[in-house]
Image: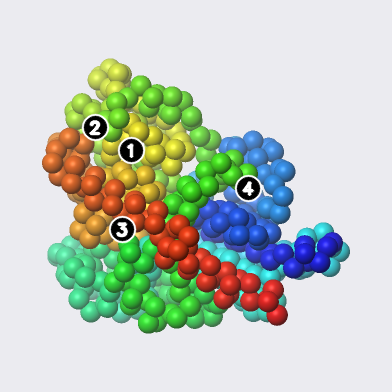
């Protein structure tokens, strides 16, 4: 191996094994690869098999200096059909207990390959903040480790206060207590308890998710740096509060905006969808007028009752607006979706329902004028980068927090009540798509989109922060 190749930095990136965590980590991997890094991307065996099934058996072949490795997730082997219905709690507990050993073995194997001259030596680790068990291995190998927070900075800030937020009085879930204002967390303005991470809505002080979050947060001070897929402009108050707590903290997003600036690169075909995309929807969108169509997608983990799904369905139908709706096979609790012939006839000329799609391609299609979303952070960021205002129906985790920002802080979306009704959906779809309120939101989100583009260009805040985290943390060993 040449001296140059030996000095090439080598980053090992490890996402938490869920779709919404893999996506931003792969984007960050691409950004680092463009900056000269050799990349090893670590999926679980289970998810790698799903990716090969959705994208084809040779999807990851032929990429120079960008390789994929796998580790087991510690659960029983997946069944033959690639079923995605894994128990989140079992996965979480297994990651806590079982990942550290195979991850250590993987780094040892990469170390041996580097000695043989096959790859550059590993110089740094980048892990999802939920995979913070990898910090111990980083310490053992004396490697810098950066934690990527896959959620908003605001939800991260609320997670830091979980110990204080845990309530033991069962009445608070039903007596309006969740409407209480949170005025004691620096950086959070006009927030209520219901706007914080949904995990706090428990009456069990020993709740496993609460324990897990606290455990994750307690490890942050051991990381070399923390990075966010956001910008200082999007979450300035929160970032000011966080930087006083964590000096090595960098906003290096939106990743989508970074990657949009080099759309025809050699990594364009490298994707991370665990479901097979249905591309006929892009052809269907070609027949629609600019800005006329509502895109509906509740993400990779949201589930709902059949009753709620039908309220959404008839609300969309009665709005008389064209819509593209992504319905995963496991979206409805306890069964598949079969629509009545009446509904199918009603939407025949203006509604299309498919199983999965390339969300960014859809959001950036000229015909899309609004996005009905669960408010996951990836979806929120992608919608901003596409300049598409939102209808918000948050489900769990950080989604209520993101919804509060979308609707109240940035004013680029409208919230739909948890107990969704078709009349409300119909009314809000029209408000978003054709009324004055929607036009104002479109203007505001267009400004946010342009600001994100500025931030990720040379000289912009996120661009310079990415440079900093590379030079000050990830390249530290290469400079010695």
Q: Which residue has dot 2 on it?
A: 316
In what element is the residue under mark 2?
A: helix
* Mark 3 or 4: the one toward you: 3
Q: Is residue 208 visible?
A: no
Q: Determine the CA span between mark 2 and mark 4.
A: 36 Å
Q: Which mark is residue 402?
A: 3
> Are circles 1 and 2 on residues that touch, CB within 8 Å?
yes
Residue drawn where x is 45% and y is 81% of the image: 247
Residue nearer the viewer, 425 or 33: 33
Q: Does residue 57 appear to the left or right of 314 in the view shown?
A: right
Q: Which residue has dot 4 on it?
A: 48
Residue drawn where x is 50% and y is 34% of the image: 277
Who comes first in sequence, dot 3 or dot 4? 4
Q: Determine the CA span between mark 3 and mark 1.
A: 17 Å
Q: Determine the CA span between mark 3 and mark 4.
A: 29 Å
Q: Determine the CA span between mark 2 and mark 3.
A: 23 Å
């Amino acid at each position: 191996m040449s001296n140059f190749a030996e000095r090439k930095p080598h980053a090992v990136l490890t996402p938490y094994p869920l779709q919404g965590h893999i996506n931003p980590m792969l984007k960050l991997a691409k950004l680092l690869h463009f900056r000269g890094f050799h990349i090893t991307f670590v999926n679980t065996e289970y998810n790698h098999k799903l990716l090969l099934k959705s994208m084809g058996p040779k999807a990851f072949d032929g990429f120079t200096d960008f390789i994929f490795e796998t580790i087991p997730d510690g659960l029983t082997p997946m069944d033959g059909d690639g079923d995605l219905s894994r128990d989140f709690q079992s996965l979480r507990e297994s990651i806590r207990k079982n990942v550290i050993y195979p991850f250590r073995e993987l780094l040892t194997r990469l170390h041996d390959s580097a000695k043989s001259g096959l790859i550059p030596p590993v110089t740094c680790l980048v892990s999802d903040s939920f995979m913070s068990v990898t910090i111990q291995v980083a310490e053992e190998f004396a490697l810098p480790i950066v934690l990527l927070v896959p959620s908003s900075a605001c939800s991260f800030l609320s997670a830091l206060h979980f110990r204080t937020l845990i309530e033991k009085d069962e009445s608070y879930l039903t007596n309006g207590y969740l409407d209480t204002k949170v005025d004691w967390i620096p950086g959070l303005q006009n927030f209520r308890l219901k706007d914080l991470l949904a995990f706090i809505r428990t009456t069990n002080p020993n709740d496993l998710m609460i324990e897990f979050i606290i455990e994750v947060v307690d490890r942050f001070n051991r990381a070399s740096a923390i990075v966010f897929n956001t910008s200082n402009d999007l979450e300035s108050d929160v970032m000011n509060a966080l930087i006083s707590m964590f000096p090595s903290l960098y906003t290096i997003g939106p990743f989508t905006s970074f990657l949009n600036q080099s759309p025809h690169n050699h990594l364009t075909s490298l994707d991370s969808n665990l479901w097979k995309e249905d591309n006929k929807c892009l052809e269907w969108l070609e027949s629609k007028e600019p800005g006329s169509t509502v895109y509906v997608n509740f993400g990779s983990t949201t589930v709902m009752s059949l009753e709620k799904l039908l309220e959404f369905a008839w609300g969309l139908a009665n709005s008389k607006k064209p819509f593209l709706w992504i319905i995963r096979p496991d979206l409805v609790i306890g069964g598949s979706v079969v629509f009545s012939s009446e509904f199918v006839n009603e939407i025949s000329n203006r509604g299309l329902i498919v199983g999965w799609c390339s969300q960014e391609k859809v959001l950036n299609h000229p015909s899309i004028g609004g996005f009905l979303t669960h408010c996951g952070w990836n979806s929120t960021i992608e919608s901003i980068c596409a300049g598409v205002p939102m209808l918000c129906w948050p489900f769990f985790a950080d989604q209520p927090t993101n919804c509060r920002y979308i609707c109240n802080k940035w004013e680029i979306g409208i919230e739909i009540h948890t107990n969704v009704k078709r009349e409300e959906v119909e009314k809000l779809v029209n408000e978003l798509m054709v009324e004055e309120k929607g036009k104002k939101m479109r203007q505001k989100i267009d400004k946010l989109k342009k600001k994100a583009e500025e931030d990720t260009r040379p000289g912009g805040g996120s661009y310079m922060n990415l440079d900093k985290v590379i030079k000050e943390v990830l390249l530290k060993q290469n400079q010695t």
